[in-house]
Image (tube, rainbow, N blue to C red):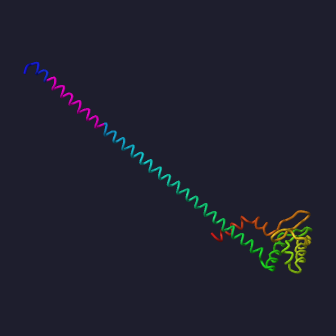
Amino acid sequence: MSGLDKMKSQILDEATHSAEVKIAEAKAKAEELIEAAKAQAAAEVEKISNKATADAKNYAQRVASSCEMQRKQALLRAKQDVISGVLDQAYERILNLDADAYFDMVRKMLDKYVLGESGEIYFSAKDLSRMPAGFEEEIQKAAVAKGGALSLAKEAKEMDGGFILVYGGIEENCTIKALFDAKRDELSDKVHGLLF
């Protein structure tokens, strides 16, 4: 081999060696980049997975909270319906008391609501027709005991039960319905305490 061939061979060997080193470095760099990309991708997958898990957990909690609120609202509505039903039954029972028990209750109401003034008292047609003998005198005695006077109106008023007092043109509604309506919250609380 001549000197020139040796030089060519040496330059070629060095170039091949240099190319192999550069290829090896490029492969190593490529491997490094691939590993870094894999690590970054794994981190992103982990991040996305954690976020998805957290989002699913939050959604499940919101759904559970919403379901619980709906359950409580349904329970409250059911309780209110039961209480309303009990009060409606109590109202009907009072209206349907036998005459003796009903007018005993009316006597107690007279003691509570009659004023020490002159006035008139009105009853429903049903109550006027079943009023016990001597009850008009009891009404007058209740009024006198308070320092007033009451006369029984012979005309009936449209009402279910109880009475209406009229003093100087001003009506005081003492019907069973008005008394129930005025005490509805208090009665509801009592029924709630007894039932629940």
Number of labels in the image equals 0
Work out which quarter of the rendered image holds the N terminus and state it. top left
Determine whether 177 is above or below 30 in the image.
below
Is residue 101 found left or right of 27 in the rendered image?
Answer: right
Determine whether 127 is above or below 49 in the image.
below
In the displayed image of the protein, which residue is found farthest to the left? 1
Instruction: Name the residue located 42 percent from the left edge and 46 percent from the top edge.
Output: 48
Q: Foreground: 49 or 196?
A: 49
Instruction: Name the residue located 33 percent from the left edge and 39 percent from the top edge.
Output: 36
Q: Position of residue 131 (x, y in %)?
A: 86, 78
Q: Position of residue 178 (x, y in %)?
A: 79, 66
- Quarter of the view holding residue 116: bottom right
Is residue 33 found left or right of 47 in the rendered image?
Answer: left
- Quarter of the view holding residue 102: bottom right
Question: Of helix, strand and loop, which mostly describes the magenta segment?
Answer: helix
Magenta highlight on residue 35 = no
Q: Position of residue 86 (x, y in %)?
A: 69, 70
Work out which quarter of the rendered image holds the C terminus and state it. bottom right
Is residue 169 found left or right of 82 in the rendered image?
Answer: right
Magenta highlight on residue 19 = yes
Q: Which residues are magenta?
A: 10-32
Is residue 89 found left or right of 163 in the rendered image?
Answer: left
